[in-house]
Amino acid sequence: MPTCPAGHVGAADDYCDVCGIALDAPEPVVAPDSRACPSCGTGQVGRFCEECGHDSLDIAVGAPRPPVAAPVTWQVVVTADRGYFDRVVAAGGPDSAAVEFPLYCPERRFVLHDDRVSIGRRSRSRGIHPDIDLIGPPEDPGVSAGHAMLVRAGDAWAVVDLSSTNGTTVNDAVDPLPANRPHPVADGDRVHLGAWTTLTLRLI
């Protein structure tokens, strides 16, 4: 039985019984205001092909869909840092002789949801409720109620010391950050507060 260029089988030997294409036409006829359906080759006007139902908004047949980028998520891991504590004691920090390193301090994790994330110790009497609350137990007495803040700029972060009593340092720096001035931080950077508290930034 005759087969038209679009693949339809019919009884007529001059024009296709299904789509009307001349059987001797080398390619499917596409009307000027239409386009060839990428699935079956017939003329397609509008979004859906009337012959096979192909959706023109779909990605081309056989082409893989592009991967969807995973959302960028940051978190802060809070730990009791023995190495940092030893440096504070060796430097003779304020009240360092009276502060003991905690025997047990579970790791805490905070996902950074907002563009500004406050760090400190909760104080109901002063109305201070930091996003990263380091109230404990155990409690690091060197952490101020409103100690520091993480500020987001796009996918990057900076830490700002909020004129804390004992200062804020980053990584292995000895000198504390200038108060109220953003300092850029990246994945893996360590922010040190108080006598033994370390906050590590993680991109997850």
Image (cartoon, rainbow, N blue to C red):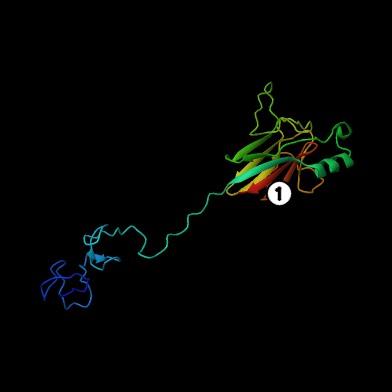
Q: Is residue 175 left or right of residue 119?
A: right
Number of labels in the image equals: 1
Quarter of the figure with residue 139: top right
Q: Disc 1 marks which amino acid?
A: Asp
- Which quadrant does the N terminus fall into? bottom left
Q: Is residue 158 left or right of residue 28?
A: right
Q: Residue furthest front?
A: 1
User: Closest to the observer: 138 or 142?
Assistant: 138
Alpha-carbon neighbours of circle 1 within 10 Å: few (<14), some, or many (≥20)?
Answer: some
For the point 68% across and 48% down, the residue is 184
Q: Position of residue 54 (x, y in %)?
A: 28, 60
Quarter of the figure with residue 178: top right
Vertical side of 149 occupied by 12: above or below: below
Q: Which residue is mark 1?
A: 189
Quarter of the figure with residue 180: top right
Vertical side of 186 occupied by 101: above or below: above
Q: Position of residue 108 (x, y in %)?
A: 68, 38
Q: Residue furthest top?
A: 125
Q: Position of residue 166 (x, y in %)?
A: 79, 35
User: Closest to the observer: 91 or 25?
Assistant: 25
For the point 26% across and 68% down, the residue is 41
Q: Position of residue 129 (x, y in %)?
A: 65, 28
Vertical side of 93 occupied by 69: above or below: below
Vertical side of 65 occupied by 197: above or below: above
Q: Secondary structure at mark 1?
A: loop
Q: Is residue 14 left or right of residue 7?
A: left
